[in-house]
Image (cartoon, rainbow, N blue to C red):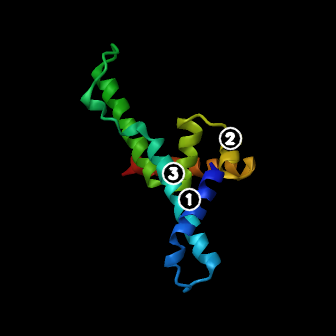
Amino acid sequence: MVDDLVQEVFLAAWESLPKYQGNASLRSWLLGIARHKVEDYYRGVLRAALPLDEDFDSVIPDTGEPVEILLDRDRANQRVHSVLHSLPEPYTLALLWRYWEKRPAREIASRTGKSEKAVERLLARARAQFRKRWNDDQTK
């Protein structure tokens, strides 16, 4: 994935080179393009990893469970979704990759270029923020 992103950055830079005015250094200009491509990538990953938007109340499955339990589960899902979206994007992505997509920290590390320890620390901070915001919502 990193190779694809690098290729996209250089392709975008090549296509935009005639528009380069020299107001900033070539390095800064190229880093700006790279930053935008990486942001676009993570936004796409975030959208693809969130099939939580499905309307639960449009179809209530006949599982034999009481409707109250199903509705409580739906409210909890909506709350999880809301709290996730209130977190900074790196935290949201880390939590989704780890818990929604069930990716191990080692795989997340290899895909992001971080060390496994760095991913574990990121996950710890993300869980702490999620827990704090979850509890803050309960007190309101």
Residue 139 appears at what percent x and percent y? 40, 50
Q: Secondary structure at mark 1?
A: helix
- The count of marks equals 3
72 over 16 or under it: above or below: above
Q: Which is nearer the N-term, disc 2 or disc 1?
A: 1
Give the image quarter of residue 65: top left
Q: Residue tagged by mark 3?
A: 132
Q: Quickly name the residue at label 2.
A: 107
Residue 135 shows in this picture: no
Q: Amino acid at mark 3?
A: Lys
Q: Judge depth for marks 3 and 1 and give the one in front.
A: 1
Q: Residue furthest bottom?
A: 23
The numbered dot on residue 38 is: 1
Query: Which residue appears at 48% of the width and 41% of the height?
Result: 49
Three-letter code for the amino acid on which mark 2 is drawn = Glu
Closer-to-camera residue (18/46) = 18
Q: Secondary structure at mark 2?
A: helix
